[in-house]
């Protein structure tokens, strides 16, 4: 187990470093932040040189990268070109909102997927299964911004049930979570259904039934519990997709999260903010996947042995 | 976005091919889901292939004075000659949707083909060479997966500008991981098998091993993954237009029409709604097919 | 089949919403039981509170770090300059009661007495000196505002309420510039104590409202400045600005009544606003002008005949009438009719495709010649305009290819480097409302915005206009300049924009500002 952990950790370090390099080079290809900052004025040549020096952009790229790495290891992700604020502080401020949205989306997805999946599996081939499957496939047939806009128009403007946008309280979380979670719920419902089908055919289910346990108890206690394992793994793997999805959803719902900060930062060429947030986001994803791997390894030791091979 | 597939590394003995496919064909015809999916997808495919024949007009003929004209069946004045109305610069919406099928399918299919080719090649390399090559490629896959796709797309499109082929390329190069992992897993398990070792001993080339033992066993999973990715990529095109990085608005893409029409929802709902329905029908159709294929082909999920 | 799918989707959504509604309303209910007050408050919004939906968050409130209109929409209520500009763009005294030129290079200001900053610090000559020392010194170097005030050398304190501004060179539009962002007065003690970073997010000025709280990308709350120097103002107790980037969402918030005023109504949304009886659509002429500019060093548009042909081939009137819904005004040059230097007698090139074809033939341009047109991908309205232009130029035999690009790349990289194709969209505000700003930046050789155009005569006229304070002479120079530019066609001026706002009818005294700087002092709600 220790060897597996160490190996995985080393991998993660490598991946974070590689992402740092990629994003560092990519942002520098997006253009010169200095000329954007001066857009409206009539800058002198000296002013431009001076600003570039202040921002540390006058050094060769490899020197900049070296300095950045050095700072990164001490937990310093630099300061925003635009506001001078520390990137870490900005992330701390925004991370909450984004994670809340991501968990909200996850919650919605599970809330829909589990009942739909179970019903589809238990009453396989029935009308309920039919609608369940249609629903789970329709869920992934909309672009998410469109879904968001439609939810706002229907449930905020026409019906007035929920606020359209903003970040004030729990009721504000509902529509963005649905917009984010609905897409995932389609895939999840499908997964729950097939896992349930698999589990329900196992010997121990029949044994439980033959003991005269009530059917719904069998389903929940023996069926669902076992069917949830692949679901949980899958959720871990989808965490990245979910975080990516927040970029668009935050824009539609004026949600003050990392996605919006990033889009702004990209359009303003705020290099430290882009770099810092992409690195931290990736880090988060790697961390979640690592957790999934490890917990999975505990549940099922066979995977641990194969860990190096099939991750 | 990247659907990390749970790979099935367990080796399936080589299946007798002909029987498998023809049986599948019969089951296909009997399956309502699959037939419906095929029918919906064919709507788009036929539109794409025969656009000039079907479409009442060309997709770029515009008349500013006839912008946002209502669909003919809901126009009481009886003046509208457009079945689905006109868009914001006065082009026939129906014609644009029919021609749009070409672009949307092109985006979906070509980008997935790119991912597939990259993925299969890298997967084979990783599987056959093993050791550090494998390690490196798999870490590269981790990097790709950990980098949020939409950000990657935004940054790349910011650097190189928007455009149809750039968009296809971006979608293509960021979705290879699933394919690579499938192929690599298969190569790894096949390599260890005795009859493959034996074949190798009597001088079978790697190419032959790939053809005889690797591809037949992963082809079904690849088909499933590819189908589902086509659907996702059609949707992603729309999302990129939404954040201002789509293709030239004179090229009719469903996603572009949907995103650009969103401000007219209340006054000229048809501008965005019909392209939205076109996307939905097609993606739904592809998903129905993909879903069925998965049930059929992925033994792990077949009960 | 189609119908069935639609119904299923809808019913599924409804079920889903009901389920969620059930679980989310629980916490709300408990809070109502514990304390019934908030709910009633939410239903009937307290008097004299206003909520605005704006499109962008400037992220930094420090006036010398910014050039964003988003900044000014909010910060105009927090900060004030020595002079201020009214909503219809006239200059009037602000924190200075009067000013006069002592000589060519000395400008003396008499300051308003009895004004305090929001933190209680007094406003006086020291504060003015500190403001300009900061703007013109090291601190200012880091931001984009310093360059606008390069003509000022320093500020000297004469007595507590008098300062002299010493100039390096003549600057005919200096007074207007002093109403600009970078010249608003900041509190010296507060700034020194709290530091630059704190000031970015906790700005303090002398304005009618003070900043109560700021949540990045979400909202900023302003409360009444009880000790504001203008009697009886402001009328509102509390103002909330919410940052809502997506126009569709802003409109939805307007319709639900969550916001009272909406900034940046898209032209495509005007009918929706008009359709609601409690909302009012408001329009205001803006100084921003849109034009198609040419890369005059690129074939075939290096030929003036081709440029002229394109000007004749674009039907700007039709575009304004249809795509802009009438919310735009034709202009004859790259400046608005509010600009000093606008010549109403200069002719317009009216749509004449035959003449265009003839000019193209004379220039030897073949049918089907391809031209690249660059525009930013986020400008929804101009995307439509560009498609109309593509179609209209197509009718005279030119094949236009539209290139959508990221707006920052476009303005900071492609245009200044001459990489924006044969033609590109350019929108310019000319914030000083004097053609000097636009003309110099657009036509003077070697300027950031002008990588290719050069004409000796134009250079001469620009020099003439800059070297005098005599407005008559300057106007004459501008007149000649306009004529020269009309002949050379370095750009095709399309239209001057009209900004659209929406306001709930319960809002009284609101005037949409031409420069996006909202004056909330006289605004109240019913």
Image (cartoon, coloured by chain):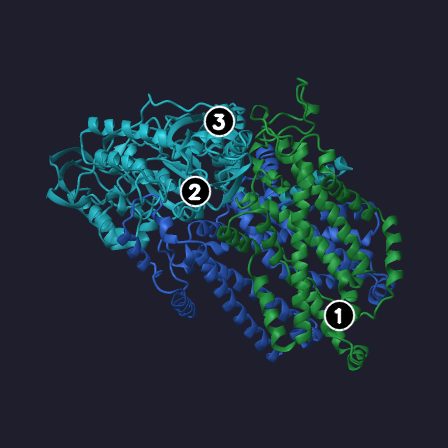
Chain colours: A blue, B green, C cyan
**Mark 3 and mark 1: Cα distance apart in space:** 65 Å
* Residue found 65% across the figure and 30% down from its top: B92
Q: Which residue is mark 1?
A: B210
> Of C17 and A296, which appears nearest the observer?
A296
The chain letter under disc 2 is C
Query: 10 Å neighbourhood of mark 2: few (<14), some, or many (≥20)?
Result: some
Mark 2, secondary structure of its residue: loop
* CB contact under 8 Å: marks 2 and 3: no
In the current view of this chain or complex, which residue is farthest to the bottom? Answer: B201
In the displayed structure, C84 sits above or below B216; it is: above
Q: Is residue A149 left or right of residue A202?
A: left
Q: Is residue B230 above or below residue C284?
A: below
Please name whichever residue, B114 or C127, is drawn nearer the observer in this view of the structure: B114
Earlier sequence position, callout 2 versus callout 3: 2
Q: Compared with residue B179, is residue C434 higher up or lower down, i.e. above or below?
A: above
For the residue pair B5 and C280, the one nearer the viewer reads as B5
Which residue position holds label 2? C298
**Residue C166 sits in quarter:** top left
Q: Chain of mark 1?
A: B
Alpha-carbon span between mark 1 and mark 2: 53 Å
Chain for disc number 3: C
Q: Which residue has dot 3 on it?
A: C358
SS type, badge 1: helix
């Amino acid at each position: 187990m220790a060897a597996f952990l160490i190996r995985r950790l080393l991998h993660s370090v490598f991946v974070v470093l590689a992402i740092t390099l990629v994003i560092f080079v990519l942002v520098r290809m997006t253009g010169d932040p200095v000329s954007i900052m001066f857009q409206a004025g009539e800058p002198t040549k000296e002013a431009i040189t001076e600003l570039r020096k202040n921002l540390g952009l006058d050094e060769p790229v490899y020197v900049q990268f070296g300095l950045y790495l050095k700072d990164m290891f001490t937990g310093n992700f630099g300061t925003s070109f635009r506001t001078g604020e520390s990137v870490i502080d900005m992330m701390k401020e925004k991370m909450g909102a984004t994670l809340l949205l991501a968990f909200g989306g996850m919650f919605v997805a599970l809330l829909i997927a589990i009942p739909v999946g179970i019903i589809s599996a238990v009453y396989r081939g029935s009308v309920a299964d039919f609608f369940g499957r249609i629903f789970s496939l329709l869920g992934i047939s909309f672009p998410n911004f469109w879904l968001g806009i439609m939810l706002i128009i229907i449930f905020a403007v026409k019906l007035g049930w929920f606020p359209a946008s903003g970040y004030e309280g729990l009721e504000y979380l509902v529509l963005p979570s649905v917009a984010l979670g609905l897409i995932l719920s389609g895939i999840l419902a499908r997964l729950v259904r097939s896992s349930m089908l698999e589990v329900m055919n196992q010997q121990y289910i029949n044994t439980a039934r033959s003991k005269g346990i009530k059917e719904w108890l069998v389903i929940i206690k023996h069926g669902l519990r076992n069917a949830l394992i692949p679901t949980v793994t899958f959720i871990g793997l989808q965490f990245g997709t979910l975080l990516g999805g927040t970029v668009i959803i935050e824009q539609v719902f004026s949600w003050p999260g990392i996605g919006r900060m990033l889009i702004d930062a990209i359009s303003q060429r705020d290099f430290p903010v882009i770099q810092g947030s992409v690195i931290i986001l990736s880090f988060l994803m790697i961390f979640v996947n690592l957790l999934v791997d490890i917990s999975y390894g505990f549940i099922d030791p066979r995977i641990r042995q194969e860990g190096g091979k099939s991750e | 976005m990247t659907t990390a597939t749970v790979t099935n590394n367990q080796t399936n003995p080589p299946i007798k091919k002909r029987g498998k496919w023809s049986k599948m064909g019969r089951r296909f015809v009997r399956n309502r889901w699959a037939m419906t999916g095929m029918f919906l997808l064919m709507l788009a495919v036929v539109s794409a292939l025969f656009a000039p024949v079907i479409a009442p007009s060309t997709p770029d003929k515009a008349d500013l004075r006839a912008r946002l004209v209502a669909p003919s069946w809901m126009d009481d004045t009886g003046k509208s000659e457009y079945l689905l109305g006109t868009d914001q610069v006065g082009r026939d919406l129906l014609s644009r949707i029919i021609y749009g099928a070409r672009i949307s399918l092109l985006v979906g299919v070509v980008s997935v083909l790119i991912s597939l080719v990259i993925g299969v090649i890298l997967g084979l390399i990783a599987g056959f060479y093993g050791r550090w090559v494998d390690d490196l490629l798999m870490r590269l896959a981790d990097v790709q997966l950990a980098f949020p796709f939409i950000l990657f797309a935004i940054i790349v499109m910011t650097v190189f500008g928007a455009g149809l082929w750039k968009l296809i390329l971006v979608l293509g190069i960021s979705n290879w991981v699933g394919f690579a992992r499938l192929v690599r897993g298969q190569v790894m398990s096949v390599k260890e098998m005795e009859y493959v070792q034996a074949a190798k001993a009597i001088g079978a080339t790697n190419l032959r091993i790939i053809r005889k033992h690797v591809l037949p066993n992963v082809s079904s999973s690849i088909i499933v993954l590819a189908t589902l990715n086509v659907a996702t990529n059609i949707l992603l095109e729309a999302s990129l237009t939404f954040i201002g990085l789509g293709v030239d608005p004179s090229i009719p893409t469903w996603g572009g029409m949907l995103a650009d029409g969103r401000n007219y929802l209340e006054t000229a709902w048809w501008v965005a709604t019909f392209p939205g329905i076109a996307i939905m029908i097609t993606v739904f159709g592809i998903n129905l097919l993909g879903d069925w294929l998965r049930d059929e082909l992925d033994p792990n999920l077949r009960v | 089949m189609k119908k069935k799918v639609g119904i299923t989707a809808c019913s599924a959504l409804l079920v889903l919403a009901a389920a969620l509604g059930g679980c989310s309303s629980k916490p709300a209910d408990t809070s109502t039981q514990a304390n019934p007050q908030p709910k009633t408050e939410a239903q009937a919004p307290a008097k004299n509170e206003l909520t605005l939906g704006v499109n962008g968050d400037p992220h930094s409130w420090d006036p010398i770090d910014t050039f964003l209109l988003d900044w000014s929409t909010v910060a105009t209520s927090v900060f004030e300059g020595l002079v201020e500009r009214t909503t219809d763009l006239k200059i009037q005294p602000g924190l200075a009661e009067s000013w006069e030129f002592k000589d060519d290079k000395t400008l003396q200001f008499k300051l308003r007495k009895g004004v305090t900053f929001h933190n209680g610090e007094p406003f006086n000559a020291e504060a003015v000196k500190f403001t300009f020392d900061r703007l013109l010194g090291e601190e200012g170097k880091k931001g984009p505002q310093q360059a606008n005030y390069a003509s000022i050398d320093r500020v000297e304190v004469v007595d507590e309420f008098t300062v002299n501004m010493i100039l390096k060179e003549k600057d005919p539009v200096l007074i207007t510039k002093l109403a600009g962002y970078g010249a608003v007065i900041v509190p010296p003690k507060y700034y020194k104590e709290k530091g630059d970073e704190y000031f970015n997010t906790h700005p303090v000025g002398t304005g009618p409202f003070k900043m109560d709280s700021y949540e990045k990308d979400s909202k900023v709350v302003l409360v009444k400045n009880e000790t504001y120097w203008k009697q009886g103002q402001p009328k509102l107790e509390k103002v909330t600005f919410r940052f809502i980037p997506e126009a569709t969402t802003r409109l939805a918030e307007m319709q639900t009544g969550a916001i009272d005023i909406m900034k940046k109504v898209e032209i495509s949304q005007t009918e929706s606003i008009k359709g609601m009886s409690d909302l009012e659509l408001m329009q205001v002429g803006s100084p921003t002008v849109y034009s198609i500019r040419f890369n005059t060093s690129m074939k075939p548009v290096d030929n003036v005949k081709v440029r002229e042909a394109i000007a004749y081939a674009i039907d700007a009137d039709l575009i304004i009438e249809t795509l802009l819904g009438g919310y735009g005004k034709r202009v004859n040059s790259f400046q608005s009719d509010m600009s000093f230097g606008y010549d109403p007698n200069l002719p317009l090139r009216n749509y004449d495709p035959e003449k265009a074809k003839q000019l193209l033939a004379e220039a030897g341009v073949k049918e089907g010649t391809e031209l690249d047109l660059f525009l930013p991908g986020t400008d929804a309205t101009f995307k439509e305009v560009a498609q109309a232009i593509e179609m209209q130029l197509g009718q005279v035999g030119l094949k236009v290819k539209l290139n959508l690009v990221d707006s920052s790349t476009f303005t900071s990289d492609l245009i200044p480097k001459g990489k924006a194709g044969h033609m590109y969209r350019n929108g310019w505000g000319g914030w000083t409302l004097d053609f000097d700003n636009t003309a110099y930046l657009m036509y003077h050789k070697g300027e950031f915005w002008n990588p290719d155009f050069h004409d000796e005569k134009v250079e001469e006229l620009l020099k003439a206009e800059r070297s005098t304070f005599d407005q008559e002479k300057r106007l004459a120079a501008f007149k000649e300049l306009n004529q020269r530019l009309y002949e050379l066609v370095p750009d095709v001026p399309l239209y001057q924009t009209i900004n659209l706002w929406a306001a709930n009818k319960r809002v009284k005294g609101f005037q949409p500002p031409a420069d996006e700087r909202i004056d909330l002092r006289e605004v109240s709600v019913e």
